[in-house]
Amino acid sequence: MNYFLENLAKRKKIVQKSNNLPFLMVRVFISLLLICLAFYSYSQELNSKVLINTEKLQSSEKLLFEEMESNIEQFLNNQIWTNDKFNTHEKINCNFIINITNEPSSNQYEATVQILSSRPIYNSSYETILLNHGDREWIFEYFPSQTIEFVENGFNDNLTSLLSFYAYMIIGIDYDSFEEKGGEESFKLAWKILNTSQNSGYKGWDQFGSRKNRYWICENFLNPEFERVRKVMYSYHIKGMDKLYLDPIESRSIIMSDINSLNDVNKKNFNSAIVNLFIDAKADELTKIFKGGNLNERRQAFNLLSEISPSNIDVFNKILE
């Protein structure tokens, strides 16, 4: 991505070698070079894969849903969401699994969607899950040959708002895992989308629905009351997971401290969206991490995690096996 920026002198030589070309050709060449420079100055942040499942529909237009799948994926991957520069290998891997459950009217769809994102762990080929969230309140319109276009300061359509909201949440959570509160700006942009979507009448954008809906997820990330959870997000990854392969004993100790912090927050705000989001992403991983500890560590981890998330007790039972 930085090829052109790192080779300014080479570009001068290229232009000098072009002196024997007609003047117009030189100008065209320079213009193309500048376009490439502008393109490489900012790179798309997401490496998204989209899967649309229509098995629950009585009949489906295969070509339409193939087009929808392709357009959604292109929108997520081609939109420039931040001013940060990303190399290709630095893009954030994420998946949108869209299960369309109903078509209440022509070109209107109801769906449940599973959104996943991950990030690599240093000194390994392992990728840790950052987000594993199910949204059961997707209602949107899609027409053949529809263009999905991001609108920064307004509501265009619900599909665009849903995709844009989760794009910023994915980026924000990723940034939080590399820097304390690193995702603040992305969460604010997601909140902005949420605010502009609240008057649309679509579900999931206001505080009166599920405590796990879009409103509460974003609200929790921006609420100072949950700042400790965001610090855990950073510590868990940078001080824990990224050093796990080099020093598993110290890393487990840090992660245990992080789980204690989560439990403290959970006691004051039981069943909060942000804590649930963390546990939903990390339950299997935490189980594997603490299975490698001594008996006291395993018991302590089991007790803490079962208290934080009783619904995952079957998963956490494996820590003691």
Image: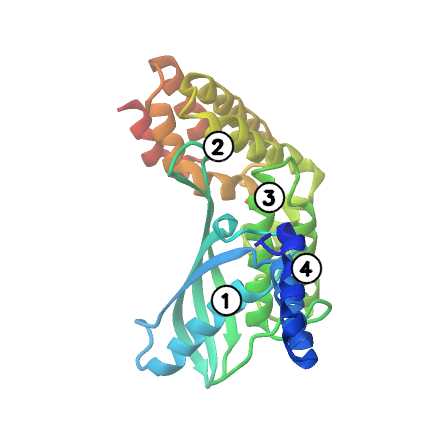
Q: Which residue is under mark 2?
A: 308
Q: CA distance from mark 1 to mark 2?
A: 28 Å
Q: Secondary structure at mark 4?
A: helix
Residue 175: image tag:
3
Q: Is residue 39 left or right of residue 146?
A: right
Instruction: Looking at the picture, tell me which residue is in the foreground, 110 or 310.
Output: 110
Q: Residue at x 48, y 32 (%)?
A: 308
Q: Secondary structure at mark 2?
A: helix
The local crowd at label 1, few if under 14, some if 14 to 19, many if 20 or more residues have their Cα within 10 Å, is many
The numbered mark, 1 or 4, whose residue comes first in the sequence reads: 4
Q: CA distance from mark 3 to mark 1?
A: 26 Å
- The quarter of the displayed image where residue 80 is located: bottom right
Q: CA distance from mark 4 to mark 3?
A: 37 Å
Q: From what the image shows, is residue 68 above or below residue 293?
A: below
Instruction: Looking at the picture, tell me which residue is in the foreground, 24 or 187.
Output: 24
Q: Residue at x 47, y 17 (%)?
A: 250
Q: Residue type at mark 3?
A: Tyr
Q: Secondary structure at mark 1?
A: strand
Q: Identify the image quadrant of the N terminus.
A: bottom right
Q: Is residue 63 left or right of residue 139?
A: left
Mark whose residue sits in front, 4 or 3: 4
Tag 1 near tag 4, CB within 8 Å? no
